[in-house]
Image (cartoon, helix red, strand yellow):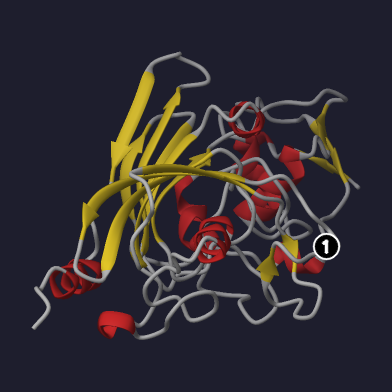
């Protein structure tokens, strides 16, 4: 499809003009098209922030209907760090990261669309890595196609450092440990992930004891890889299930309505400025309350 940029759009950003076209329909759809180099301006690819002069010819393939339906929503978000290239968001528990069957609205992505996120798949603009719905904490998000590419390269090089706090049932045998065991969809239950799988993928988790409690232990957990449910599966496999985990652990432990797992720290070298970025997130109130209960001495 070809469309001429109106003369009165001179000075406007490419993504804004593209989003205004009825065949595109939203900023998210425009960003998705630009992310996969699906737009030409007078025959050349341009970044989303490119300023148009007016009169140029835009050439693009209209996005699928579901992408046109991805619109920004007013979802309160805590942005803890940002610049023109990327941002770090402190995701609350209960918020799904991106659209999926049964979650077509009200996701983190919908809340981020007003923050100029870009790169990645059509319904996941800006998303570099994920957190489970009921896991709160820090995520880095891209604001351009190039930022997304460079952040993904950090993940692939295992240079995006992700630190979690996990309260587990039981006590570890040592103060530090390394779990290396492939993870995939469980052979018998495809809704779960486990070590008993026909589709194993390398998975490595490191943990260190933070606090030893009467019946629990607070662990500092670091991911070397990032498989689905990796921490929960690995800790359960060594006999230290995450407190409150309804799938792999002990649900409703200490009054918890979700797993005690928090993405507490994020560290990386900025892919553009090479500045060291380190961000921390405090424990949410429900986990603070559960930890206080776990600290109570046995009667």
Query: Do we see residue 242 in this rendering?
Result: yes
> Up-down: is 296 above or below 135?
below
**Residue 131 left/right relative to 66:** left
Front in this rendered view, residue 231 or 195: 195
**Residue 271 left/right relative to 101:** left
Q: Residues within 10 Å of mark 1 (few under 14, many from 20)?
A: few
Front in this rendered view, residue 80 or 94: 94
Image coords of residue 77 (percent x, y): 35, 58
Residue under the point 59% across and 33% down: 144
Image coords of residue 229 (percent x, y): 58, 62
The single residue placed furthest to the front in the displayed view is: 173
> Up-down: is 231 above or below 34?
below
> Up-down: is 279 above or below 245?
above
Residue under the point 59% across and 63% down: 98
Which quadrant of the view contains residue 287? bottom left
SS label for mark 1: loop
Residue under the point 35% across and 83% down: 257
Image coords of residue 79 (percent x, y): 33, 47
Residue tagged 1: 64
Residue under the point 51% across and 56% down: 231
The single residue placed furthest to the right in the displayed view is: 1
């Amino acid at each position: 499809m070809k469309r001429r940029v109106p003369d009165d759009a001179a000075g406007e950003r490419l993504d804004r003009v593209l989003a205004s076209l009825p065949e595109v329909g939203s900023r998210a759809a425009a960003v998705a098209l630009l992310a996969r180099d699906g737009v030409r301006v007078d025959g050349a690819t341009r970044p989303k922030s490119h300023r148009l002069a007016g009169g140029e010819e835009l050439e693009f393939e209209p996005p699928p209907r579901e992408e046109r339906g991805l619109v920004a929503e007013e979802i309160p978000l805590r942005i803890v760090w940002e610049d023109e290239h990327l941002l770090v968001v402190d995701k609350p528990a209960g918020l799904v990261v991106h659209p999926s069957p049964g979650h077509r609205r009200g996701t983190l992505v919908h809340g981020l669309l007003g923050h100029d996120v870009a790169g990645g798949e059509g319904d996941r603009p800006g998303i570099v890595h994920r957190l489970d719905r009921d896991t709160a904490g820090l995520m880095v998000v891209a604001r351009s196609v190039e930022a997304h590419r460079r952040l993904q390269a950090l993940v692939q090089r295992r240079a995006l450092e992700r630190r979690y706090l996990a309260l587990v049932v039981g006590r570890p045998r040592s103060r530090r440990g390394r779990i290396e065991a492939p993870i995939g969809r469980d052979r018998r239950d495809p809704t779960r992930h486990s070590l008993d799988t026909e589709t194993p993928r390398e998975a490595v988790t490191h943990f260190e004891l933070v606090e030893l409690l009467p019946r629990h232990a607070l662990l500092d957990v670091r991911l070397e890889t990032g498989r689905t449910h990796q921490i929960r599966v690995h800790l359960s496999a060594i006999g230290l299930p995450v407190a409150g985990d309804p799938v792999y652990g002990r649900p409703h432990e200490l009054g918890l309505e979700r797993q005690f797992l928090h993405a507490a720290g994020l560290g990386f070298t900025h892919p553009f400025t090479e500045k060291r970025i380190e961000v921390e997130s405090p424990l949410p109130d429900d986990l603070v309350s559960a930890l206080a209960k776990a600290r109570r001495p046995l009667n």
